[in-house]
Amino acid sequence: MNKWIEYNKKEFGYQLTELKKIITHQVKDGGKADTFTSDMLVAIVSGRRITEKMQGAIDNIIKRNSPEETFKRDEWLAGVLPKLLMVENMIKDTDWSDGYKGGSIHFMESIIKQAKNRKTLSKKQMEAISKMYVRIKKNIEKNK
């Protein structure tokens, strides 16, 4: 077992230091680290054999948390967040029932929360927001 610890330190030294930096940064920002990132660090430190799939996941974690990628995501968030908030506020101007409005607002709040926390949304989420915007706009135009 001890030889695997030494092997991992030698073979994955860069990944080890990068994961430690990422976890330290996450703890400073949000108070707790991402569980998966912590598990990958523990796997390297404890001497567990690192498979190709695990190595790929570790490399993706490092890439995703690189300064360039973080800057790109922050820029994306700065462009998208005002639009999401606008759609959320437009829901209040519709003549939908209270239950339907509430569900729509809840959906938008969860989308906004994910956009802020993960700094990304899936293609389907973006499409759903676009469809909702069209429905809201149509409803508001109809009621003028």
Image (spheres, rainbow, N blue to C red):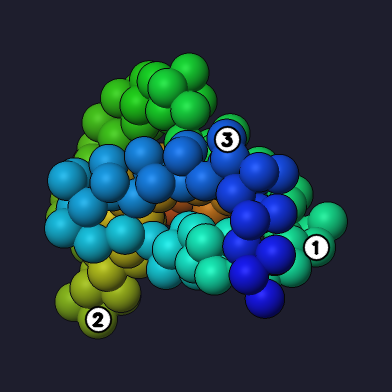
Q: How many badges with numbers are in the image?
A: 3
Which amino acid type is shown beneath numbered disc 3? Answer: Tyr
Write the residue at 42% across / 28% down. Answer: 70
Q: Nearer the viewer, residue 28 or 102?
A: 28
Which amino acid type is shown beneath numbered disc 1? Answer: Thr
Label 2 Cα neighbours within 10 Å, binned few <14 / some 14-19 / many ≥20: few
Q: Is residue 91 left or right of residue 134?
A: left
- Secondary structure beneath label 1: loop
Spatial distance from mark 1 to mark 3, Cα to Cα? 16 Å
Q: Which residue is mark 1?
A: 51
Between discs 1 and 2, the one toward the N terminus: 1
**Mark whose residue sits in front, 1 or 3:** 3
Quadrant location of residue 43? bottom right
- Secondary structure beneath label 2: helix
Between discs 1 and 3, the one toward the N terminus: 3
Write the residue at 70% across / 65% down. Answer: 3
Q: Residue furthest front?
A: 2
Q: Nearer the viewer, residue 9 or 63?
A: 9
**Mark whose residue sits in front, 2 or 3:** 3
Report whether residue 112 is seen.
Answer: no
Identify the mark at residue 14; answer none if there is no mark. 3
Q: Which residue is mark 2?
A: 99
Spatial distance from mark 1 to mark 2, Cα to Cα? 49 Å
Image coords of residue 141 (percent x, y): 33, 41
Q: Is residue 42 above or below residue 123?
A: below
